[in-house]
Image: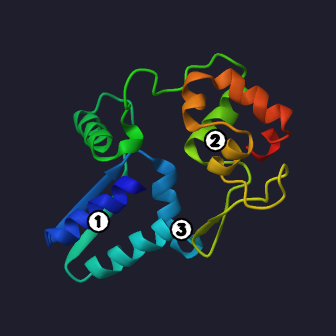
């Protein structure tokens, strides 16, 4: 969705017109944007505002394409997305999580690293999290969970087993 938003920014900035095709290998994002009546998050609303602005100057198509099928253009798009957004870039050796635990533990690590916790929900376009069960004071955002357990993000990358054990010991694992 970030890349689609950036593509629309590009179209607006350079005042392109005519037929504009935005291809995405994320079927779920294309479907999500197709059901526009149900979109309530901020990025989705920004995309719809941009589409509305563009409707007078161009015909905009958002098309899903299968990924990982050795499509030259899909490979180019993936490369450009990785260059454009820091989330895709590794900041050096060890910047990815290497962990050989069971699927449940792998999912928990991926959730806290990406910010997509089980308790994440949206309210009027804003992210909302449950209250932390350890301190009972503020929302249990990924950063707060790490802080509350006296951990840092770097621990996720270098000591993932330890992070899981600390989260379990502090009864925070159910929030992840």
Q: Which residue is mark 3?
A: 35
Judged from the image, the secondary structure of the residue bearing numbered disc 2 is helix
Q: Earlier in the sequence, mark 1 or mark 3?
A: 1
Asked whether the residues under the numbered discs 2 and 3 touch, taking CB atoms below 8 Å apart as contact, a structural biologist would say no
Q: Earlier in the sequence, mark 1 or mark 2?
A: 1
- Residue at image point 40% right, 69% down: 47
Q: Which residue is mark 1?
A: 8
The dot on residue 175 is: none
Q: Considering depth in this image, is 65 or 13 the residue closer to the camera?
A: 13
Q: Is residue 86 above or below residue 32?
A: above
Asked whether the residues under the numbered discs 1 and 3 touch, taking CB atoms below 8 Å apart as contact, a structural biologist would say no
Q: Is residue 44 above or below residue 88?
A: below
Quadrant location, the N terminus: bottom left
Query: Would residue 140 appear left or right of 124 to someone viewing this image?
Result: right
Q: Which residue is mark 2?
A: 112
Number of residues whose C-alpha sits closer than 10 Å to that of mark 1, classed few (under 14), some (14–19) or many (20 or more)? many
Q: Earlier in the sequence, mark 2 or mark 3?
A: 3
Q: Identify the residue at the far bottom of this view.
A: 56
Q: Considering depth in this image, is 35 or 176 the residue closer to the camera?
A: 176
Disc 2 vs disc 3: which is toward the camera? Answer: 2
The Cα atoms of the two marked residues, 2 and 3, are separated by 28 Å
């Amino acid at each position: 969705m970030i890349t689609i938003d950036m593509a629309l920014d590009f179209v607006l900035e350079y005042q392109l017109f005519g037929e504009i095709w935005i291809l995405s290998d994320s079927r779920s994002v294309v479907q999500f944007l197709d059901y526009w009546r149900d979109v309530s998050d901020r990025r989705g609303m920004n995309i719809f505002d941009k589409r509305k602005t563009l409707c007078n100057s161009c015909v905009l198509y958002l098309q899903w394409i299968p990924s990982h099928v050795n499509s030259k253009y899909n490979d180019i798009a993936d490369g450009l997305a990785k260059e454009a957004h820091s989330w895709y870039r590794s900041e050096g050796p060890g910047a990815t999580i290497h962990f050989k635990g069971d699927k449940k533990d792998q999912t928990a690590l991926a959730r806290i690293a990406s910010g997509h916790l089980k308790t994440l929900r949206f309210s009027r376009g804003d992210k909302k999290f449950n209250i932390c069960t350890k301190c009972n004071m503020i929302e249990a955002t990924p950063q707060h969970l790490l802080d509350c357990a006296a951990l840092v993000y770097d621990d996720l990358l270098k000591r993932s087993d330890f992070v899981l054990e600390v989260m379990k010991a502090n009864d925070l694992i159910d929030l992840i």
